[in-house]
Image (cartoon, helix red, strand yellow):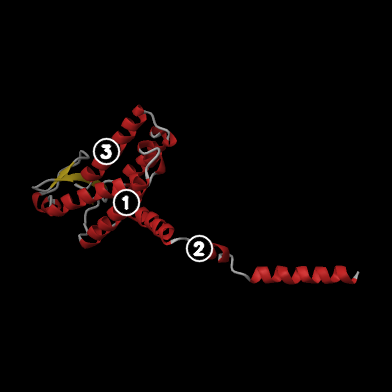
Amino acid sequence: MRPATMVATHLDAELQHNERRPLLTNRADGNNNMSPMQKAIGQTYQSTAHLAKLLPSGTVLSFQILAPTLAKQGHCSDMNRMMTGGLVVLCALSCCVLSFTDSFRDEEGKVRFGFATPRGLWVIDGGAPLDPLGAAGFRMRFLDFVHAIVSAMIFVAIALFDQHVVSCFYPTPSEDTKQLLTALPVGIGIIGSMLFVSFPTTRHSIGSTLSSQ
């Protein structure tokens, strides 16, 4: 009976020792064993996810829903490539166009939407137009073109991180192509984030969140 008692005591001591260990120890050890390239790719995925929040939510959501189906899970025919390419182009154009939209709250507190023009804001939801003085604050600016181009760039970076899309166009990429497909979204993400931070916009375009005030 004494050996059995000693074994039970040893097991209890080991169990108590494991309970005192942090739950994330193994995950931290795994991150420490990652190569610099793997860490960079992981950080880029996180950065791109944050940048996606700057894009119209409806456009990004539509792409995430339609891309796996149109790309046929990466096993594309010529028709699938055409449809997937068309989806990427349409979504990128959508990001550009929506960069010129804005929203405001009227006297009743309802959210109104419109397109920025050189003269002001063209209200597109069928409501009464803004007075000239109020519309002047929404007129088209050079910054809108910057954000339109950057939004399209960010969307292309997000599309390049989609494995279904990449596999559709590059089913058997060479080593040079793999390096390009890894480095290009990283460069686009860095440049896009720098431009968004350096030139912030005050517009609340369609698909973005408008404050309650």
Q: Is residue 137 above or below residue 160?
A: below
Let me know if residue 160 appears in the view. Answer: yes
Tell me which corner region of the image, top left, top right, bottom left or bottom right, holds residue 40.
bottom left
Furthest residue to the right?
1
Furthest residue to the front?
175
Q: Nearer the viewer, residue 85 or 204?
A: 85
Q: Nearer the viewer, residue 99 or 134?
A: 99
> Mark 2 sits on what residue?
33
Residue 134 x %, y %: 13, 53
Residue 76 x %, y %: 39, 32
Q: Nearer the viewer, residue 102 or 8?
A: 8
Question: What residue type is disc 1 on?
Answer: Pro
First along the sequence among labels 2 and 1 = 2
- CB-based contact (under 8 Å), mark 3 and mark 2: no
Badge 2 element: loop
Could you tell me how far apart the alpha carbons at marks 3 and 1 are, in whole angstroms? 16 Å
Could you tell me how far apart the alpha carbons at marks 3 and 2 are, in whole angstroms? 39 Å
Q: Nearer the viewer, mark 3 or mark 1?
A: 1
Could you tell me how far apart the alpha carbons at marks 2 and 1 are, in whole angstroms? 24 Å
Let me know if residue 53 appears in the view. Answer: no
> Mark 3 sits on what residue?
89
First along the sequence among labels 3 and 2 = 2
Which residue appears at 82% of the width and 68% of the height? 7
> Mark 1 sits on what residue?
185
Residue 15 x %, y %: 71, 68
Question: What residue type is disc 3 on?
Answer: Val
Question: What residue type is disc 2 on?
Answer: Asn
